[in-house]
Amino acid sequence: MRLAWAWLSFSREGQQQRHPVSEEQNKVIVRRFIEEMWNQRKLHLADELFASDCITHQLRSEEDAVGMPRSPESVKREAAAWLSGFPDLKFVSEKIIAAEDEVVTHCTMRGTHSGIWMGVPATGKKVSVPIITIHRIVGGRIVEDWVLVGSLLLFQQLGVVPATQTLVARATT
């Protein structure tokens, strides 16, 4: 088990102390987020897995990557909205890599759009979308994350946005 010195505290005397953080333990937290919270629908685990002052960087077009608060309650609301639109939603972990206090995951999100999601009526279409996330973990909780979803692919699979070839053809004419 590899240990990283990732977080600090101070003794009563004001001396800085380092605490070992297990990269394997950090991976366990992220696996629980994916497998238990999302795939097993245990949304209440957000209270245990996320710090109350977590910051998220949702990497979306036309938005700054400036961090926004992401409380456990907001995580549960976001998950519930996704699950309402895609009741059979599942995440498949393709790769998980840990380095010090960060865990990088490459997942594939799969599901059927059978409910309203982001105002888009159910299409009945199946989606398979790549997601890359970096979670920063301190004291056993997710305190910050950076999330990149293959949104163009998702909207193309739903039929909301034309295929890439059509977009390119329109842009070049």
Image (cartoon, rainbow, N blue to C red):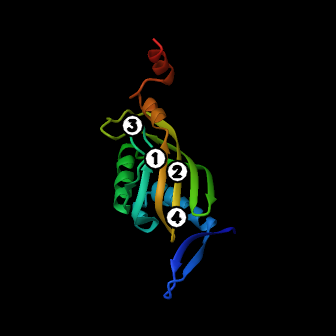
Question: What type is the residue that disc 1 sits on?
Answer: Leu
Q: Is residue 144 above or below residue 138?
A: above
**How far apart are the alpha carbons under marks 3 and 4?**
28 Å
**How far apart are the alpha carbons under marks 2 and 4?**
13 Å
Q: Nearer the viewer, mark 1 or mark 3?
A: 3
Q: Position of residue 36 (x, y in %)?
A: 49, 60
Query: Which residue reaches farthest front?
Result: 14
According to the picture, the residue beneath numbered tag 1 turns out to be: 89
Q: Residues at badges 2 and 3 in contact (C-beta under 8 Å)?
A: no
Q: Secondary structure at mark 2?
A: strand
* Residue ID at (59%, 68%): 25
**How far apart are the alpha carbons under marks 2 and 1?**
17 Å
**How far apart are the alpha carbons under marks 1 and 3?**
26 Å
Ranked by sequence position, the earlier of labels 1 and 4 is: 1
Q: Residues at badges 2 and 1 in contact (C-beta under 8 Å)?
A: no
Ranked by sequence position, the earlier of labels 3 and 4 is: 3
* Residue ID at (58%, 76%): 19
According to the picture, the residue beneath numbered tag 4 turns out to be: 137
Q: Which quarter of the image is occupied by the C terminus?
A: top left
**How far apart are the alpha carbons under marks 2 and 3?**
19 Å
According to the picture, the residue beneath numbered tag 2 turns out to be: 133
Instruction: Using a 10 Å C-alpha cutoff, classify the residue at mark 2 as few (fewer than 14 neighbours), some (14 to 19) or many (20 or more).
Output: many
Q: Quadrant of residue 64?
A: top left
* Residue ID at (46%, 46%): 89
Ranked by sequence position, the earlier of labels 1 and 3 is: 3
Q: Position of residue 87 (x, y in %)?
A: 40, 46
Which of the labelled discs sits on residue 161, or is there none?
none
Q: Secondary structure at mark 4?
A: strand
Q: Which quarter of the image is occupied by the N terminus?
A: bottom right
According to the picture, the residue beneath numbered tag 3 turns out to be: 62
